[in-house]
Amino acid sequence: MSPQRTAPHPRAPRPTADFSLRVYDVVRRIPRGRILSYGGVAALLGSPRAARGVGSALAALPDDTDVPWWRVVNRNGRISISNLHHGATLQRALLEGEGVIFDARGQADLERFGWEP
DNA sequence: TTGTTGACTCCCG
DNA sequence: CCGGGAGCCAACA
């Protein structure tokens, strides 16, 4: 019953939540021992300018997530998160545990460990 | 809805 | 190396 032309949902579902789910899908595909930049994830989603959005989506992940968030680093191959709660230390340890090597400047070689589908 | 913040990236001094 | 500013997008109060 809809006597009026009022459409049930004239607009598309919230794109924001959808964006985060897409981020998680991409990150889950990054193989063990490989890394991808925030901008790289955004580019695979078709939004090359949404690097910050990727970081924001990953920051919202719960601690018990199955999403390998630690495989996402900045465009220089460096860990971008703060270490106030040892987050950076944890991320680096997880990556090193997978064979990723960081040089003296704390930088991983994207040419060597970078991943692309 | 608006304003702020930040796990980004690019550009310039 | 360190700042500042701009553009971008999502999370949150």
Image: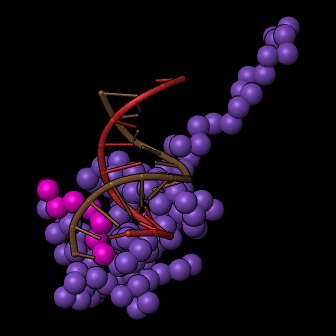
Chain colours: A purple, B red, C brown
Choose top left, top right, bottom left or bottom right for residue A83: bottom left
Of all residues, the one furthest to the left in this rendering is A85
Does the magenta segment cover residue A117? no
- Residue at left 79%, top 16%? A6
Residue C8 versus residue B8 in the image, above or below: above
- Residue at left 53%, top 80%? A116
Relative side of A95 to A51, left or right: left
Horizontal and vertical percent position of residue A91: 24, 69
Front residue of A4/B6: it is B6
Q: Is residue A114 visible?
A: yes
Of all residues, the one furthest to the top in this rendering is A3
- Residue at left 71%, top 31%? A11
- Residue at left 35%, top 78%? A77
Horizontal and vertical percent position of residue A2: 82, 11
Does the magenta segment cover residue A84? yes
Q: Is residue A96 visible?
A: no
Choose top left, top right, bottom left or bottom right for residue A80: bottom left
Quarter holding the C terminus of chain A is bottom right
Front residue of C11/A28: it is C11
Residue A79 versus residue A8 in the image, above or below: below
Horizontal and vertical percent position of residue A40: 50, 71
Horizontal and vertical percent position of residue A26: 51, 65
- Give the prevailing secondary structure in the magenta stretch: loop
Q: Which residues are magenta?
A: A78-85
